[in-house]
Image (spheres, coloured by chain):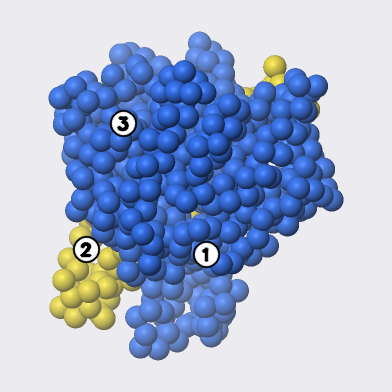
Amino acid sequence: MILRLARDIYRQEELAASGFTCVAAADGNWLLDIGPEEGSRNLLNGMLRLPAPGPAPSREPGVVPPASAISLPTENHYRYERLFSDTWFLSSESGRWLLLSDAEFRDFRAGNAGEELAGRLAANHILLDEKNIDGYIGVLANRLGFLAEGPTLHILVVTTKCNLSCLYCQAAASKGGGAHMESGVARAAVDRIFESPSTSVIIEFQGGEPLLNFPVIREVIEYSEEKARTSGFQVAYSLISNFTDSVTYDKLAYLLQHDVSITFSLDGPEQLHNTNRGASHDNLFATVLVNVELYRRACRDVKGADSSLHALMTTTRESLPRFREIIDTYLNLGIDQISVRPLTPLGGARRLQDDIGYTPDEFLEFWKECLGYIMELRRSGRDIKEFHLELILTKLFGNESGYMDWRSPCGACYGQIVYSGDGSVFACDEARMILSDHYKIGDCGIQTLPQLLLSEKAGAIFSSSMLEMYLCDYCAYKPFCGICPVINFSEYGSVAVNVLQTRNCKIRKGMISHVLQLFLKDSKAREEFEKILLAVEWQK
Amino acid sequence: MTTHGKNTMTILKVSLPKSVFLSTAMVLGAQYYLDQYYVEISDEGVAYGISLTPKGEETPIPDRRELLNRMTEAAFLIDQAERTREFRSAMLAKALSPYAKGDQT
């Protein structure tokens, strides 16, 4: 089958890379023989996107375009989406948004907005004039303030050894393999951390199972505490554990004495949690319960009071019908916040996608059911929250831009960096998990932090996560969203993907529009949203 | 518009003038259809041709007027983004200027 495809839309190098032989016709088309394969036509669908992201912008920071570029009053750039048959959602770059009826939207686009409508549009930065322009710039500056901080989250992969072989492990850690971080590498990583432009940093211990290399955790804590005393840095610590065999009372007590926030894996009820832990283990759910009690005892001994528990839940196919049991398990353990997370398609989760994965629509349906049950529980007096709901609400109503996975540019390099056991420095947590040096930005024993962050590679990674580089630039939810170039690279073999066709895009758009629809149509949900917003910690 | 029952036949083809529809608008407007249809865009001299072929036999036949509406919306979005590009850049630079070169106040 011969197709004629416009040469200014389909790029020759990409057609060639996909195995197509194309001939340039005189009429501006490629002549392409795609054969009988329908897969070929899906490949062509995938090419309908903006050109690949280019190198990092070279503009000098702080160079402001001439005043002639700004003439007021003006219709600002805005994006829109139809929420219901008679309701439009409009957003501006500042993250302000409003809803318009069909008639109002028609009037506005025809240039016939009356005084009242114009006032609402101006209040939400869709129309700009001398009165609101400074406010608009101020909100933008506030939203982008994270760019000046440098990396605040420093992840130390203190070991890639693990005592378990969880099915979906994105770090691809397993029993038997892996290596510990050595003391010298750990100290070099701490030295780099104290070169950060931000004097308020978080050191997070990850693995494998980090508690298997406890001596290095102790060394990092004590060395960084010593450096903080003389440098004025504020350092907080966190640790992610599977909360099984490597937990002891002494380790927990030490971590609590040093204010280390501990998060552990908890996927739901016993059978589900144990299944996800992989083959031939004892009842690890029971071990987790024992360790939760041990943690509480250590808390009382060290802090003189109970301390809240943090857990991470990962959704597998088996989780989908069990949303009530999963949430009940959290409540029964006294955990009042759950993060209903989809699989991250890296490591085991990617390898076993056909067995434990699901479609974006299936995940969304699950998330909505979780939310429905959480709303039901809240109305009966249980104070339980879901992380993504709280995140979306704070983005829509509170200008949140701290959560690195849902912002543009994402957190890679300039929000977080990762130090692996051999001293390699990676752009982000996901970057070290793809088992490739594609997103490695250097070595903590060789380069300083400024050298790492100002490298050409870090700049390219930074620019590849800017939504302006993708069709996201036309999405009404752009001010509230972000992409992960590492996951795109891992899933599709290139950062030049059609983002609108990715799993993450479908899930996130679905989540945001569901929250907006509940907000508009469900007065009981709206009441709960207000309570959640009143209780939220704004600086996450 | 031609309609056929078989999923391998092009069932809808529309020409859109280049004077109104930039290539980016064609790409943006096509997005809505990528899940259900094979979409191909050809160059017809003064116009782009966009054709939709259903991926499955159960896929609904696309509506010509809806396709035109979606492409027109896309052209509007692209046009608006282009018109405001310089302004957006200016606003962004002003917003970032307090953070430049070590001034983090």
Q: Residue at x 34, y 70 (%)?
A: A354
Give x and y (percent) for residue A259.
57, 27
Q: Relative to the observer, which residue lies in front, A59 or B75?
A: A59
Q: Relative to the observer, which residue lies in front, A50 or A307?
A: A307
Q: Which residue is mark 2?
A: B62
Q: Is residue A383 visible?
A: yes
Chain under label 3? A
Chain under label 2? B
Give x and y (percent) for residue A376.
16, 31
Q: Is residue A131 above or below residue A35?
A: above
Q: Is residue A526 above or below residue A492?
A: above
**Residue A42 figure quarter:** bottom left
Q: Is residue A413 visible?
A: no
Give x and y (percent) for residue A301.
48, 23
Q: Residue at x 54, y 31 (%)?
A: A253
Display colour for chain A? blue
Chain under label 1? A
Q: Which mark is residue A175?
A: 1
User: Which mark's residue is nearer the viewer, 1 or 2?
Assistant: 1
Q: Is residue A536 above or below residue A376?
A: above
Instruction: Provide the secondary structure element on which disc 2 rests.
Output: loop
Q: Which quarter of the rendered picture does the N terminus of chain A lie within?
A: bottom left
Lower position in the chain sequence, tag 1 or tag 3:
1
CA–CA distance between discs 1 and 3? 31 Å
CA–CA distance between discs 3 and 2? 52 Å
Give x and y (percent) for residue A438.
66, 61
Q: Which residue is mark 3?
A: A334
Q: Give the letter of the yellow chain.
A: B
Circles 3, 2 touching at the beta carbon (< 8 Å)? no
Q: Relative to the observer, which residue lies in front, A520 or A171?
A: A171
Label 3 neighbour load within 10 Å: few <14, some 14-19, many 20+: few
Label 2 neighbour load within 10 Å: few <14, some 14-19, many 20+: some
